[in-house]
Amino acid sequence: MSWKTFVGGVVAGAAGVLGGGSLLRRAFQREPVPPAVSEPYVHSYWLESAGFYERQPNPPLLAPRTSADIVVIGGGYTGLSAAWHLAGRFRGKRIVLLEAARCGYGASGRNGGQALATNLNFAGFPSRWADAGRCISLIGLEILRSYAARHGLSFDLRPAEYLVAATSGRQRPALEETARTLEALGVPLRWLDREAALRELGSEAFVAALAYTDGSAALHPGRLALGMKGLAEERGVEVYEQTRAVRISGGRTVEIETEFGRVTASTAVLATNAYSHALGLFRHSYFPLVTSVIAAGPADQAQLAAAGLKPARMLVTAEHSLHYLQVTPDGRLILGGGGAAHIYGGLVHGGNHKAQLARLPDFIRRVWPDLASLPLTHGWSGVICYTRDGLPSIGRLAGCPNIYYALGYSGEGVSFAVAAGKILADMIAGFPLEPEIGMVVDRPLPYVPPDPFRTAAFAARRLFL
Ligand SMILES: Cc1cc2nc3c(=O)[nH]c(=O)nc-3n(C[C@H](O)[C@H](O)[C@H](O)COP(=O)(O)OP(=O)(O)OC[C@H]3O[C@@H](n4cnc5c(N)ncnc54)[C@H](O)[C@@H]3O)c2cc1C
């Protein structure tokens, strides 16, 4: 880090603490960092195999003034689900979605494709949290199933057994905590000791594992994102890509300034996930963390069988820097994790994080040496919106009752984001919410300090946890 960046960070941090709109902030804050379009090319297997790179993006919204009923900012799963559900609830209303880059270009087109039915971040919290997580995840999975069964989307959705595996005895307490959460939720599980793990996973690297089938599903994230965009458009949502919101202000009418013009609406939905701080919002509410994924293979049936891997089985390790894995229907290993990085100043440079990408193949070498010769075909990174306690929030901006948001899924956001979009639409329509969800609604997010303290706090967390 250069001195200039360091001093800039301190000043920007101090300016942030002194409060929004201050002279100091305006004097020192650089222009907001372009959230997504400025990232380098993202070599995502999911985006590539969904045909993302061959398709033309939708044109930007160039009109100097646009008036809509509802504006959704952000075209990931949260924004696309919100827009689609809103279009179903408010027929005939003008719903506009603004996406800085392209729909699915954020975490939604780059994740591990694990749609969880039990949110493991909630393990260790009082049971009402686990109940809330489970309730929201199941809403998301139900929507995903309906996308596939009733709305004709094809995104390789398949129910999958889930394995949480320990690679050292020190991870056993984490495994036990997860087991307690699952048992409290009534999820039947199997304990695998070292021998059973060796038998089932063909690896001596695992000292124990938990296996359960709780309704979690594996899927193709890129096809899902593009499919959701199509569904929203079919319902009449106007989707503008390459249109970055640069400022949003509340009031009876919400005003959104884009790079090209101004959009006004009576209601807005902020679905900008780990990029929200670039809009000046939630700047002290989460760590934007860069995390990476590789694709290897395809492996043949015999190789997969020897490693106990199959498309209907997903795995996560109980390591602090956890690894997660799914196998695609054509035998590719999709492996992510192995640590996350906080980039100084909260820069959302999530394209291809070389240091992390270089470490991921070590996991395959260590756990399944026979699979280490598989060709590595893709490697990419993305940004997750990690809150200090790992728990999300869905609600309205304080003081702006017509600006809704959902974020902070902390790396477990596939089913969650899809559900959050529906929950936001229900809130806007005034529909009653499931009582369990109340835990998450308007939940104040624990404070995350500005840089340089934030980077230091993150490093300390890695050192001491
Ligand atoms: C590498 C990686 C692996 C992951 N693996 C898993 C997994 O296996 N299982 C799981 O459950 N979760 C996983 N996650 C998390 C999950 O992908 C996310 O929680 C989820 O996709 C969030 O969806 P979203 O719509 O809220 O955000 P995003 O998909 O990030 O979408 C936000 C969108 O907003 C746009 N945007 C931002 N700022 C602006 C602006 N100013 N104006 C207009 N548009 C803007 C961005 O371009 C982006 O398209 C992973 C995440 C990453 C990064």
Image: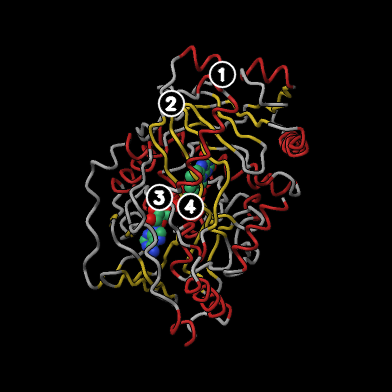
> Pointer 1: what residue?
307
Q: Which residue is mark 2?
A: 332
The answer, for residue 124, to whether it is visible in the render is yes
Pick whichever, 269 or 375, lies toward us.
375
Give amino acid for label 3: Gly
Secondary structure under the numbered disc 3 in the rendered image: loop
Q: How far is mark 3 from mark 4, CA to CA?
A: 9 Å
Identify the colour scheme used: secondary structure
- Please name the residue that numbered disc 3 is placed on: 351
Label 4 sits on residue: 383
Q: Amino acid at mark 4?
A: Val
Say if 88 sits above or below 253 in the image. Answer: above
Q: Which residue sits at x=57%, y=55%?
A: 386
Q: Earlier in the sequence, mark 4 or mark 1?
A: 1
Q: CA distance from mark 2 to mark 4?
A: 23 Å
Mark 4 residue CB less than 8 A from any atom of ligand 1: yes
Give left or right: position of 253 versus 238. right
